[in-house]
Amino acid sequence: MDEKQLVRQVLSGSDSAIRLLISKYERLVIHMVTRVVSNDMDREELCQDVFIKVIDKLNSFHFDSKLSTWIATIAYRMAVNFAKKKKLEQVGLEEVAFKVGEINDVTEEQDMKKFILRLVEQLPHSYKTVLSLFYLDGFSYPEIVEVTGMPEGTVKNYIHRARQKLKVIVEDHARREVALL
């Protein structure tokens, strides 16, 4: 199957074409990501994110270059952006130390983000997925539909239910914290 046929079939929603696309370019994506990101878990997650983005943005590919070049560019840029973000997170507190009044605010905000992410991890997989795509990755409903294959009503429902479950988890955690005081 040539690139144009593969792209058409992936865009039409063919699961087998998506699997073929991933298997055909998996080594390339791993190679590009490995050049920039050293942590195994981060690399694995980033490779998955690359393919989500490739599939999401495939309709904007116009065959101006080879598909492999386009995918490698996406993988490389995402890896570089990831590495920059990681580096900023690691250096962040050292840089903020010069602004003594802001240290507590930044630390509390980072702790809160970590805390919220740990709570999100307690949600069922499908809820966690749509919630993360919507809030963390900034995907629109149609994009989440495209990525997950779920109907738009289901995506909206899962996001609503995930928020409700997260609220219950937060309230339960707050009650336990108050009980410890």
Image (cartoon, rainbow, N blue to C red):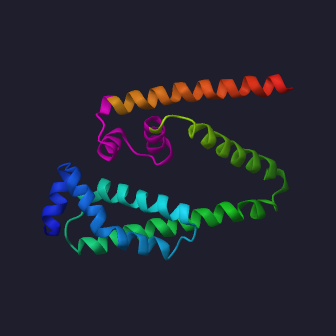
Could you tell me which residue is drawn at 54 percent across and 66 percent down? 40
Based on the picture, tell me whether residue 157 belongs to the magenta stretch: no
Residue 71, position as x, y percentages in the image: 32, 68
Q: Quadrant of the N terminus?
A: bottom left
Query: Would residue 30 appear left or right of 173 to someone viewing this image?
Result: left
Based on the picture, tell me whether residue 151 belongs to the magenta stretch: yes
Q: Quadrant of residue 154?
A: top left
Residue 81, position as x, y percentages in the image: 51, 65
Residue 134, position as x, y percentages in the image: 44, 41
The mark total stands at 0
Q: Quadrant of residue 129?
A: top left
Can residue 73 be seen? no
Q: Quadrant of residue 145?
A: top left
Could you tell me which residue is drawn at 26 percent across and 62 percent down? 21
Can residue 130 be seen? yes
Of residue 87 and residue 10, the one placed in the foreground of this image is 10
Q: Quadrant of the C terminus?
A: top right
Eyeballing the image, is 15 above or below 31?
above
Q: Which residues make up the magenta segment?
A: 126-153
Could you tell me which residue is drawn at 69 percent across and 49 percent down? 110
